[in-house]
Every structure is written in C-alpha cells, then in structure tokens.
Amino acid sequence: MPRGRDTKKAELIPRTLMAEQMSAQKPRSRRMYWMWGIALFLLVSTAIFCWLVVVPVMEVRAVARRVHDELGLDTSFVLGGFALDKRIAELGGAGLAAPKLSLYLRMPQTCAPHPEAGVLMLMECREYSSPYLVRFLRHEHPGVRARAAYALGTIAAPGRIEALIAALSDPDARVRYRAAHALGRIGDRRAVLPLVAVLKDESPLVRRWAVSALITIGDKRPAASLIPLLTDEDEHVR
C-alpha cells in the first residue's frame, strides 16, 4: 500500500509542475498579444496618416514648386489660364485639389515652402475653395492672407464679410488694401463704417482702396469723412 501511495504522489508532482508552468506562461502570452496588438495599431495608424496627410502634402509640394518656378512670387493677383489649370489637373481637378491645397497650406513652412503658389492654385479652384479661404485670412504668411482676401471679393464663402472687416486691421498693408478692395467688390453696407475707420490708415494704398470701396458701395453716410481726403498727400487718394 505505501508503494501505491508513493506512485500516486510521483504522478501528481509532474502534473502540478505542468499546471504551474502553464499558469506562469498565461500572463506572458497575454503580454505578447497586447504588444502585437499595439504594434499592429501603430502600423495601421502610420499607414493611414501617410495616405491621408503625407502623400497629398508631398504631391502638392511638388506641383507648388513648379508653379513657383513658372510664375514667381511677384506675380499679379489676376492669374489663371492654362498654367494653373494644368497644375490643378495634376492634382485631380478642382474638386480634389482644393482639400489637398488646404491641407498643404496648414502645414508649417518647412513642409510647405511655397504657400503663395498653393493659395494661387486654391483661388483657381473657385467654388471648391470657398470653405477654406476665410481660414487663410489668418495664415502666418502675409502673401497668403492678401491673396485669400483678394479671392474672397469674388468667391462667396460663409462669414467672408466679417472676416474681411477683421482683415482691415491686419498688420500687413497688402492684406488691408486687398480686404478693402474685396469689400468694395462685394458691396455689402456692413463694411461702410469699418472702411471709414481705415481712411486714416498710414498706407496710401489702403486709403485709396478704402475710398474706392466706399464709392462703389454708394452709401451716403461717409460723405463727410471723405472731404478731408481732398487734401491727402497721395494724388491717387485725392
């Protein structure tokens, strides 16, 4: 009988060891599954980010560089024609190009070195650009803000009047005079008093376009404010 008990004990010892080993392996296997899951999540997230952000930005960056080389930064505001149409077609047409250009323009200048070329193409997307142009009146690059203000004079966008009125206080004179010009083209009477306020602007270009905008709008309220400008130092303002 003792021998039978010893035999049973001997059989139980390996089973106990195996159970202990299996219970020790379970936390390790769970940890390994968690690590594989996290790695897979990071891999998929990186792939999605590259597809949605990196690829479009690099695509626009290459096209913007060509536009910059072809047209230069000192190009007039009135642009269009085959050159830009061709570049927009390279980005998939106006409907697809507008969100790509908007994404490019939101990047830091190290990633988007030619923002003015980007906003020029965005302007040519016409109605597809309207959801984005108001936002770029607050862009860090003054050239982008100025071109966005110019475009909003002809492209309807929600909140454009309020945004252009705010742009009359921009630190850059190019943005202020383009905002005044755009408000004159729109002809909304809400802009009358803000335009009167910039008749004393230090830049003659801003004063000139403010006068032009007020005349275009045709409101009689600012008539008294225009009289002192008859002796303005700038002949175009007079």
Image (cartoon, helix red, strand yellow):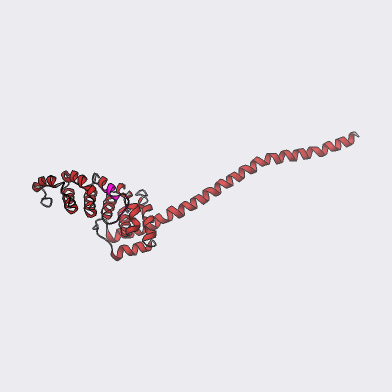
Residue 31 lies, in percent from the top left, at 61, 42
Residue 148 lies, in percent from the top left, at 29, 52
Q: Nearest the camera: 124 or 16?
A: 124
Q: Residue 169 lies in what quarter of the image?
A: top left
Residue at position x 22%, y 55% from top? Answer: 185
Q: Is residue 173 above or below residue 5?
A: below
Q: What residue range appears in magenta?
A: 155-164
Q: Is residue 82 above or below residue 178?
A: below
Q: Does 10 sit left or right of 34 as displayed?
A: right
Residue at position x 8%, y 47% from top? Answer: 231
In the picture as drawn, the residue positioned furthest to the top comes out as 2
Residue 130 lies, in percent from the top left, at 33, 54
Residue 222 lies, in percent from the top left, at 15, 46
In the picture as drawn, the residue positioned furthest to the front comes out as 220
Q: Nearest the camera: 49 or 168?
A: 168
Task: Indicate yes or no whether the magenta region holds residue 163.
Answer: yes
